[in-house]
Image (tube, rainbow, N blue to C red):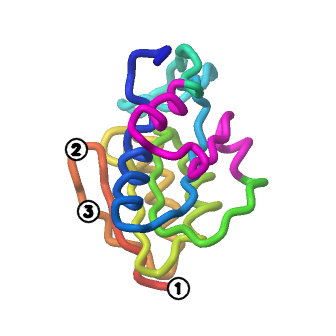
Amino acid sequence: MECGCLFGGASIFTHLAMRANGIRRKLYLFDTFEGIPGEECDLITGGKGRGHQITNYYNGVKENIVESGGDTDDFVLTAGKVEDTLPGTKLGEIAILRLDTDFYTSTRCELETLCPKLSAGGVIIIDDYGQWVGAREATDEYFSKVEHPPLLNRIDPGVWAGVKYGP
């Protein structure tokens, strides 16, 4: 593993849990695979700051999938900023939607593009809602305009989750 970190852990766990229960679905991961983009971005305090690049961990995620006993054929990894790569992607109905991009622009893009595809009874997990101002603002703004917003519940200080109950 080139970066010494477990990247892709939540997705790998989801894949293995589904497989243990006889469920086989594609998991789509959209990420820079290089850390926080280098331009100005939201910080925990709500201010602005410079992002930082880290060693590309795309191959590390693939290695982690294999090392965990997962099947790489069940994963689609898309590298780049989600606001650049996500809008043109054709995805069907989504059962579990986990957002973990920290910032306003990327979170807003994910919500606008993916939430309408979340199935009734589907789960949304917003990894950064409790810690990153941009993610929280984008989420609150988006759900303020949705007829049936989920009731988000705190899982831990950073992670909030809810269930879609409307169409």
Q: Amino acid at mark 2?
A: Pro
Q: Residue furthest bottom?
A: 167
Percent position of residue 43, x then y:
43, 29
Q: Is residue 81 magenta?
A: yes
- Residue at the extreme right: 88
Q: Position of residue 142 (x, y in %)?
A: 52, 63
- Residue receiving disc 3: 153
Q: Residue at 22% of width from left, 54% of height from top?
A: 155
Q: Name the kind of residue labelled 3 in the image.
A: Asn
- Identify the mark at residue 157; answer none if there is no mark: 2
Q: CA distance from mark 3 to mark 1?
A: 20 Å
The residue nearer to you, when weighing 89 against 17, is 17
User: In the rendered structure, which disc, 2 or 1, sits on the residue that comes first in sequence?
Assistant: 2
Question: Quick check: 167 above or below 63?
Answer: below
Q: Amino acid at mark 1?
A: Pro
In the image, 165: left or right of 36?
Answer: left
Is residue 97 or residue 167 the one in the foreground? 97
Range covered by the magenta-colored residues:
60-86
According to the image, label 1 marks what residue?
167
Secondary structure category for the residue under label 1: loop
